[in-house]
Image (cartoon, grey):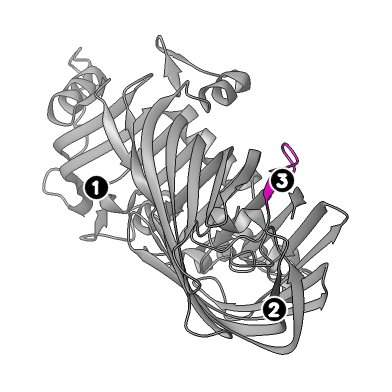
């Protein structure tokens, strides 16, 4: 299990498609917006993303903690800094990571009202909540916390590395309403998770010894799939990459979305993404610890040849047994919700469309977007205000201001340009804080290249 926790630490520490792509959502009719809302309107005949470069995005974020809290150069000792951070952290605080790479992204128009899109992407998604009691016990010991019950249920994390094959349809129902849906096949190469744990650790003053320790009603379940094969840890990266394409544990999911024009200038849209699950049945190794145990130290008898440590080990295994199994299990994907309202204004221009006609568009737009994602402990929200500007017919920009769990000062900027048939877009978040990356608790970058034929 040490290897499992090492992998979790590496994933959370070294890697950085942002879950909330507030700048990309409904931005300049980009093909990637279809992955955020399959009901977004399209005005081109077909698109093909540059393989491995059509869409790359990465985000790492933490709440109530940044690296400089511990590693800044000052007169405080690192032990004091760690203690300060631990005192500040709450059990609802977390560290999360999401990275996504599009391997294939393409689409074509079937007729005037129907557009099909399909592709394949790989994704790493991880979240770990801070087990404050566990950290405090490990950092300070139990001597100063007599009669305090340390809660084991705070051990809560989930790590996924998977591939997603998807196919979607965008259907124009009327001049005002467009609906869309997307079907997904998940292929999980790696899943590590531990949820629904419970139990407590308590230290009291003892009668026969100084202290008596209680592990009460403990139930800890560490589930893994894709990590072990034939009782050996899989350490070949190519095996994980291969399993992301129908080689791992499989599941299915659905996306839904819509766009509705109240009038020519006012638009509302929304989507529900990743409503699905993965059934884990291959390369399973689960570790379960369950039971209760009371320990009051060892009273040594120097005239005895008893093997005290063996007796203690046997007692622990009997009262708090740890067992491995290969039971299959289901993990749910983190479903996401988007809702947005946009008002367009400014200079009215004509835009060439796929059917050899011209569509009136406005150079400016502003609005608001609500985002939510379902996580193991609770639902997370973000609220974004945005302003978009069409500088030329082939150059578009978008600026966002987002309130979320990380900060109240997240300003994002996006740019999209098209030269001939080649489109490029780039997006960056937390623009004001890049002068000191060590003080950032959220970092997000996105970019991509597409071939778009009108």
Q: Which residue is mark 3?
A: 54
Position of 91 relative to 176 (above/below):
above
User: Which circle marks residue 196 in the picture?
Assistant: 1
Gap in angstroms between the C-alphas marked 3 and 1: 38 Å
Q: Which residues are magenta?
A: 45-55
Looking at the rendered image, the quarter that the N terminus falls into is top left
The nearer-to-camera label among 1 and 2 is 2
Residue 107 falls left or right of residue 173: right
Observer-nearest of 415 and 28:
28
User: Which circle marks residue 361 in the picture?
Assistant: 2
Mark 1–mark 2 CB contact (< 8 Å): no
Gap in angstroms between the C-alphas marked 2 and 3: 26 Å
* First of labels 3, 1 by sequence position: 3
Whether residue 405 appears in magenta in the rendering, the answer is no
Residue 155, horizontal then vertical, whole percent:
34, 48
Residue 236, horizontal then vertical, whole percent:
60, 18
Give the residue drawn at x 46%, y 69%: 174
Looking at the rendered image, the quarter that the C terminus falls into is bottom right
Q: How many marks?
A: 3
Residue 297, by quadrant, is top left
Observer-nearest of 454 and 267:
454
Mark 2–mark 3 CB contact (< 8 Å): no
The nearer-to-camera label among 3 and 1 is 3
Furthest-bottom residue in this view? 346
Mark 3–mark 1 CB contact (< 8 Å): no
Give the residue drawn at x 41%, y 44%: 158
* First of labels 1, 2 by sequence position: 1
Q: What SS does tag 2 mark?
A: strand
Observer-nearest of 115 and 282:
115
Residue 244, horizontal then vertical, whole percent:
52, 28
């Amino acid at each position: 299990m040490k290897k499992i926790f090492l992998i979790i630490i590496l994933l959370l520490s070294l890697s950085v498609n942002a879950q909330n792509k507030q700048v990309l959502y409904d931005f300049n009719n980009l093909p990637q917006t279809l992955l955020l809302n399959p009901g977004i309107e399209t005005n081109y005949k077909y698109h093909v993303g540059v393989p491995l470069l059509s869409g790359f995005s990465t985000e790492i974020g933490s709440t109530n903690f940044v690296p400089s809290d511990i590693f800044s150069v000052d007169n405080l000792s690192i032990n004091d800094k760690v203690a300060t951070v631990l005192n500040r952290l709450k059990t609802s605080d977390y560290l999360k990571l999401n990275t996504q790479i599009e391997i294939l992204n393409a689409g074509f128009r079937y007729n005037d009202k129907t557009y099909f899109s399909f592709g394949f992407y790989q994704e790493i998604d991880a979240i770990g909540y801070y087990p404050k009691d566990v950290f405090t016990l490990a950092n300070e010991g139990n001597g100063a916390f007599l009669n305090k019950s340390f809660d084991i249920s705070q051990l809560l994390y989930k790590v996924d590395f998977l591939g997603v094959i998807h196919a979607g349809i965008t259907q124009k129902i009327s001049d005002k309403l467009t609906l869309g849906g997307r079907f997904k096949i998940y292929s999980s190469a790696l899943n590590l998770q531990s949820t629904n744990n419970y139990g407590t650790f308590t230290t009291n003053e003892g009668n026969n010894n100084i202290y008596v320790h209680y592990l009460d009603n403990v139930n800890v379940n560490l589930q893994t799939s894709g990590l072990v094969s034939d009782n050996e840890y899989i350490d070949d990266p190519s095996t994980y990459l291969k399993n992301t394409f129908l080689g791992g544990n499989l599941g299915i999911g659905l996306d839904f979305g819509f766009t509705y024009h109240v009038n020519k200038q006012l638009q509302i849209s929304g989507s529900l993404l990743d409503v699905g699950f993965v059934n884990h049945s291959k390369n399973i190794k689960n570790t379960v610890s369950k039971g209760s145990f009371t320990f009051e130290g060892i009273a040594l008898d120097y005239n005895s040849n008893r093997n005290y440590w063996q007796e203690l080990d046997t007692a622990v295994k009997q009262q708090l047994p740890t067992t491995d199994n290969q039971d299959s299990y289901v993990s749910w994907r983190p479903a996401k919700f988007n809702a947005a309202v946009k008002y367009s204004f400014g200079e009215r221009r004509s835009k060439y469309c796929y059917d050899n006609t011209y569509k009136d568009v406005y150079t400016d737009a502003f609005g608001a977007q609500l985002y939510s994602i379902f996580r193991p402990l609770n639902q997370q929200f973000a609220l974004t205000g945005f302003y978009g500007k069409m500088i030329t017919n082939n150059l578009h920009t978008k600026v966002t201001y987002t309130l979320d769990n990380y900060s109240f000062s997240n300003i994002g900027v996006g740019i999209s340009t098209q030269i001939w048939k080649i489109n490029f877009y780039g997006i960056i978040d937390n623009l004001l804080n890049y002068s000191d990356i060590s003080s950032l608790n959220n970092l997000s970058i996105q970019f991509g290249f597409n071939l778009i034929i009108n």
